[in-house]
Image (tube, rainbow, N blue to C red):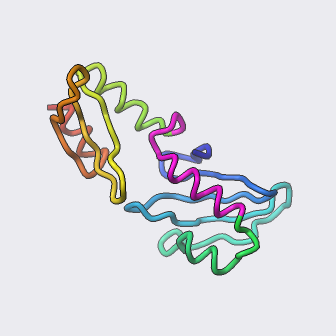
Amino acid sequence: MGMPDDDKTYRTEADGWSVVWRLDHGAIQILWVARVGEPGPLAVFDPTEPPDLVDMRERWPKLAPLWDAVRREYWAGPTSAQSPRIRQLTERAKRAGYRLVRESPMPYVWLLADVIDGEQVHVADTLDDVERWLET
C-alpha cells in the first residue's frame, strides 16, 4: 500500500498525480489530490465529509490511472508491511501462538487462528477488538 502518512491515511502516486486517502469502515475516502512536483493541490477535502473513490472517478475521469492505483492498493490490503499497527498486532499474535488473518470480502473481519493447526480461536470486527482479546 502507499506509504501511510499516519496510521490512518495513505499516499498513492500514479501517472504524475498524488492522492492522500483513508479507509473508513471499508470505504475509500479521498482527502487530498495534487500534481506531483506542483506547489499546490488540485483539491483538499473536508475530512468530516470526504468524497469516496466513486465520486472522484466521476469528478475527474481523466485521473483514472490514479484511481486505479488506489483501488489496487486497497485490494492489496492494509496487512502490507506499510501498516505499523497491523505489523505489531501480527507479531503479538504470533508470540501468543496465533495467526492474525483479515477475511474478505468487505466488511473485513479479523480472525485469530491457532498457529499450529489453523483452528479459529477468535473473530473480531476491528483491530481494537483483536488487541483487547490479546490482552486477556
Is residue 66 in the magenta section? Answer: yes
Residue 97 in picture, x, y percent from top left: 23, 21
Residue 13 in picture, x, y percent from top left: 71, 53
Q: Main secondary structure of the magenta part?
A: helix
Q: Is residue 122 left or right of residue 8?
A: left
Is residue 79 in the magenta section? Answer: yes
> Nearest the camera: 15 or 29?
15
Quarter holding residue 119? top left
> Nearest the camera: 51 or 106?
106
Residue at point 80%, 65% (across, down): 40
Farthest-out residue, right: 38
- Is 128 placed above or below 113 here? below
Residue at point 35%, 32% (across, down): 89
> Nearest the camera: 132 or 53?
53
Per the rendered image, the range of residues in magenta is 65-82
- Is 11 placed above or below 82 here? below
Residue 79 in picture, x, y percent from top left: 45, 40
